[in-house]
Image: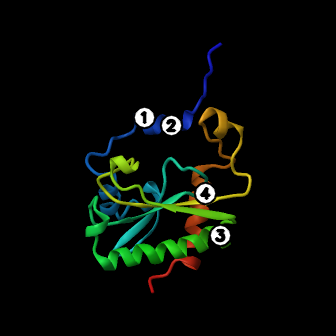
Amino acid sequence: MEDILYAPWRTQYITGKKIEGCVFCHISKETTADNTLHVLYRDEHCFMVMNKYPYTPGHFMIIPHTHTDKLEELNAETWLRMSMLAQQGVRLLKEGFGADGVNIGMNLGKAGGAGIAEHIHMHLVPRFNRDTNFMTSIADTRVYSTDFLKIYEKIKSLVPKYISVS
């Protein structure tokens, strides 16, 4: 018996236009395509964008506009802004989105597990009590109970309340 897992929503990814170069630099420069690219917030230092392949619903990233793979060489002002956005993002996910906890992480370099190693980025992954199930445990597959675009719209609607420039 052959196991088949259908995922028709991935058709656009497979057949869609490929981005040349760094995907994060592309998103950084495409300031008029925030809804299409699922950008939640942007300022002069960095931007927040939904993870296209989330670990859990609501997983987003904070990414500097500066193209670098070296955290240790990132401008201190940009790093402080990323850190402030992480604090505000945690509050958004807990208070606004209902997360019971949040994982924050950066995978630096290919050896460190980075999927996009050439441009540093910070993950904020909302966690919920009992958010794992047998699919994650035995099939290395995740099942989401809601639509990606609905989650994007929900989190984007929370940004004005929880994310500030100061």
Q: Earlier in the sequence, mark 3 or mark 4?
A: 3
Quadrant containing the N terminus is top right
Q: Nearer the viewer, residue 148 or 129?
A: 129
**Which amino acid is tagged 4?**
Ile
**Which amino acid is tagged 2?**
Arg
Q: Earlier in the sequence, mark 3 or mark 2?
A: 2
**Which amino acid is tagged 3?**
Lys
Report helix, strand or loop for mark 2.
helix
Q: Position of residue 82 (x, y in %)?
A: 41, 72
Report helix, strand or loop for mark 3.
helix
Using the numbered discs, state the Cα–Cα distance from disc 3 to disc 2 in whole angstroms.
29 Å
**Residue tagged by mark 3?**
94
Decide: is 166 above or below 2.
below
**Which amino acid is tagged 1?**
Ile
Q: Position of residue 148 (x, y in %)?
A: 58, 51
Q: Position of residue 126 (x, y in %)?
A: 61, 60
Mark nearer the viewer, 1 or 3: 3
Q: Position of residue 51 (x, y in %)?
A: 49, 54
**Residue tagged by mark 4?**
151
Residue at the limit of the structure toward the front, as seen here: 111
**Residue tagged by mark 2?**
10
Residue at the image point whose x is 40% and y is 67% from the top: 47
